[in-house]
Image: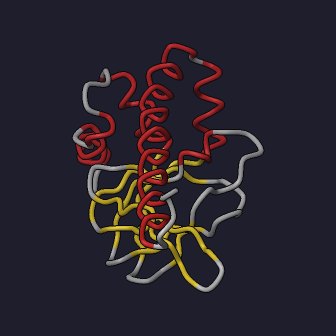
């Protein structure tokens, strides 16, 4: 993929919809394409954060390891993002990410993105507003999953 195709593909990603071309150029310069195989673990809960991903194809399960089983919190796929904790200092991964099928994504080194956000606070604000929406979505999904688990175990009545 040449740099114009790369930039065009990145600009078409749903997470970046509506960003200025200048912001897309910044992100293009910081990104590279990665591929993962079915059942591959991208990261485990508690791992140090390093990469932020924009998913181009495939599906990934976000999971929490509980005693005796794995609890799927959410499934993310094309047009979504993964690894928001990479944009925070000293925060480890909150979930395990396991590929349900082959995945292609754009990867960004979290430290490089943070440095760019610090150099250009307006860019950082625009990007981090999008990331905050992701965090809120994951929190909502976790809450719903916990409610579902609690209801199945017969809790909740008086």
| Residue in the picture at 61% in, 40% down | 87
Total count of labels: 0
Q: Which of 140 and 118 is in front in this view?
A: 140
Tell me if residue 124 comes above or below residue 104 in the rendering. above
Residue that extends furthest to the top in the rendered view of this protein: 122
Residue 4: image quadrant is top left
Left or right of residue 76, residue 29 in this image: right
Tell me if residue 28 comes above or below residue 143 in the rendering. above
Give how far across and how far down residue 109 sits, in percent: 59, 48
| Residue in the picture at 43% in, 45% down | 140
Give how far across and how far down residue 9 sits, in percent: 24, 46
Q: How is the image coloured?
A: secondary structure
Q: Which of 13 and 140 is in front in this view?
A: 140
Residue that extends furthest to the right in the rendered view of this protein: 90
| Residue in the picture at 36% in, 31% down | 24
Q: Which of 60 and 103 is in front in this view?
A: 60
| Residue in the picture at 48% in, 80% down | 40
Give how far across and how far down residue 135 sits, in percent: 49, 40
Q: Nearer the viewer, residue 155 or 4?
A: 155
- Name the quarter where the N terminus is drawn: bottom left
Give how far across and how far down residue 80 sits, in percent: 33, 50
Tell me if residue 133 comes above or below residue 122 in the rendering. below
Left or right of residue 45, residue 81 in this image: left
């Amino acid at each position: 993929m040449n740099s114009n195709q790369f930039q065009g593909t990145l600009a078409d990603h749903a997470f970046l919809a509506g960003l200025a071309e200048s912001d897309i150029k910044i992100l293009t310069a910081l990104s590279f394409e990665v591929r993962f195989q079915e059942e591959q673990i991208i990261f485990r809960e508690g791992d140090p954060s390093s990469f932020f991903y924009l998913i181009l194809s495939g599906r990934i399960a976000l999971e929490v390891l509980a005693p005796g089983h794995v609890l799927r919190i959410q499934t993310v796929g094309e047009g979504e993002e993964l690894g928001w904790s990479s944009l925070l200092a000293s925060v480890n991964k909150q979930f395990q990410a396991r590929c349900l099928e082959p995945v292609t994504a754009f990867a960004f080194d979290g430290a490089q993105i943070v440095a760019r956000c610090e150099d250009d606070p307006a860019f950082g604000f625009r990007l981090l507003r999008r990331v905050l929406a992701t965090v809120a979505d994951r929190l909502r999904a976790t809450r719903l999953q916990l409610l579902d688990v609690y209801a199945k175990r017969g809790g909740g009545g008086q």
